[in-house]
Image: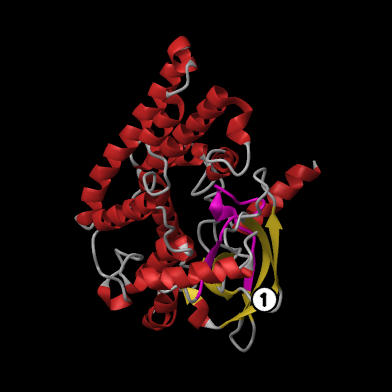
């Protein structure tokens, strides 16, 4: 876990990048951004990576929470939260996934109830929450009406992470870092409707906005993340084993082809975004391809270089240990493939009974099934 001095330095750096118009590049001028297009954002990310300097620390806020507030928030919420988010003054996290609601996000059981004075109180558990350990605010998806089917009766809340009843615990990864967290909400009073994004009952629509931007960020972010085919090819091409073992060359070719496909599909997507198209479910396929290709690249580098590839603080040890966790970000692969099949390719959906009954009844049936 990063210390306080490091976080403060990164927040200051994001403020300097914001002053130079190098973060939130696509944010409209009315919200403090330069109002440029997605192509400009990718170019800036590539140039920052080439210069060997980090981007903004609040990637969750800049890439996901900010756009969600722009699309779904009230005028007062935009005025209050966007400028501090852009400058790194207030870092955000995403309180979505739960132990029993990951890729099936609509199954969240975190509950929100309204007190007589209009105050909303949240109770539940969230997991795999990036940056929660130093975030000022979180955006939380909670259930406000269990008498609706599970995709309804959901509401999005802004949660002050220093509120009474919020507990954050780090989740240690195989890399040794604790970049993800589990967050416990115990009767957390978040305020009234001024803390609701998208209106009461509008949580699923607000969540979809976040998920689409998340998949786009991962699918189009390969170059900025350093996941370029040239980098991986250079890491293994010099090994004598590459000349002796044709199977290794075939594996490298597979990785390069997949990442080049993502690159050129990304260029096409950037053109669509520049024309005003909102990120759609097709970005999920770019996310799947990117993550699987980079994991395959890490496996190849480890096979070619042997144990040296896993020595800390080498170039590859962190990447190899971090990437498996990225498979779940933005939705697990089976869920994304179903979404692409149904909503992009027009294939018939799988039969689902959980959309036709209320959420409380669904939970009761699941408990009965476990008891039996």
Is residue 309 visible from the viewing direction of this image? yes
The type of colouring in the image is secondary structure
In percent of width and height, residue 295 lies at: 51, 34
Bounds of the magenta segment: 90-112
Which of the pair 252/215 is nearer the observer?
252
Query: Looking at the image, can residue 144 be seen?
Result: no
The residue closer to the viewer here, 300 or 212, is 300
Q: Quadrant of residue 192?
A: bottom right
Mark 1, other Cα within 10 Å: few <14 / some 14–19 / many ≥20? many
Res. 66 image quadrant? bottom left
| As drawn, 263 above or below 101 | above
Nearer-the-camera pick, 201 or 220: 220
> What residue did someone put label 1 on?
188
Q: Quadrant of the N terminus?
A: bottom right
For the C terminus, which image quadrant?
top right
Measuring from the top left, give residue 361's x and y in whole percent: 65, 55
SS for callout 1:
strand
Asked whether, in this view, residue 68 is left or right of residue 40, the answer is: right
Q: Is residue 253 above or below residue 325?
A: above
């Amino acid at each position: 876990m990063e210390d306080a001095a490091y976080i403060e330095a990164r927040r200051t750096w994001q403020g300097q990048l914001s002053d130079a118009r190098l973060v939130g590049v696509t944010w409209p001028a009315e919200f403090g951004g330069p109002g440029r297009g997605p192509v400009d954002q990718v170019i800036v990310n590539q140039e920052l990576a080439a210069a060997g300097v980090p981007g903004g620390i609040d990637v969750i806020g800049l890439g996901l929470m900010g756009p969600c507030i722009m699309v779904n928030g009230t005028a007062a919420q935009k005025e209050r939260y966007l400028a501090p988010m852009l400058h790194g003054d207030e870092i955000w996290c995403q309180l979505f996934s739960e132990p029993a609601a990951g890729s099936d996000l609509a199954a969240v059981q975190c509950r929100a109830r309204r007190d007589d004075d209009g105050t909303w109180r949240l109770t539940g558990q969230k997991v795999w929450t990036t940056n929660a350990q130093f975030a000022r605010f979180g955006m939380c998806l909670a259930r406000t009406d269990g008498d609706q089917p599970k995709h309804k009766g959901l509401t999005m809340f802004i949660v002050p992470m220093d509120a009474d009843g919020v507990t954050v615990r780090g989740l240690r990864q195989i890399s040794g870092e604790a970049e993800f967290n589990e967050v416990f909400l115990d009767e957390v009073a978040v305020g009234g409707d001024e803390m609701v994004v998208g209106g009461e009952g509008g949580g699923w629509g607000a969540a979809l906005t976040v998920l689409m931007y998340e998949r786009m960020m991962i699918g189009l972010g390969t170059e900025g993340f350093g996941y370029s085919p040239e980098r991986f090819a250079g890491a293994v091409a010099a090994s004598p084993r590459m000349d002796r073992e044709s199977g290794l060359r075939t594996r490298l070719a597979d990785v390069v082809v997949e990442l080049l496909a993502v690159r050129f599909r990304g260029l096409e997507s950037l053109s669509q975004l520049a024309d005003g198209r909102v990120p759609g479910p097709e970005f999920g396929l770019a996310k799947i391809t990117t993550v699987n290709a980079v994991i395959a690249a890490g496996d190849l580098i480890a096979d070619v270089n042997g144990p040296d590839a896993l020595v800390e603080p080498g170039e590859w040890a962190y990447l190899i240990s971090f990437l498996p966790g990225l498979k779940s970000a933005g939705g697990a692969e089976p869920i994304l493939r179903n979404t692409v099949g149904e909503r992009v390719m027009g294939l018939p959906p799988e039969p689902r009974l959980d959309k036709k009954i209320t959420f409380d009844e669904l939970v009761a049936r699941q408990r009965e099934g476990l008891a039996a």
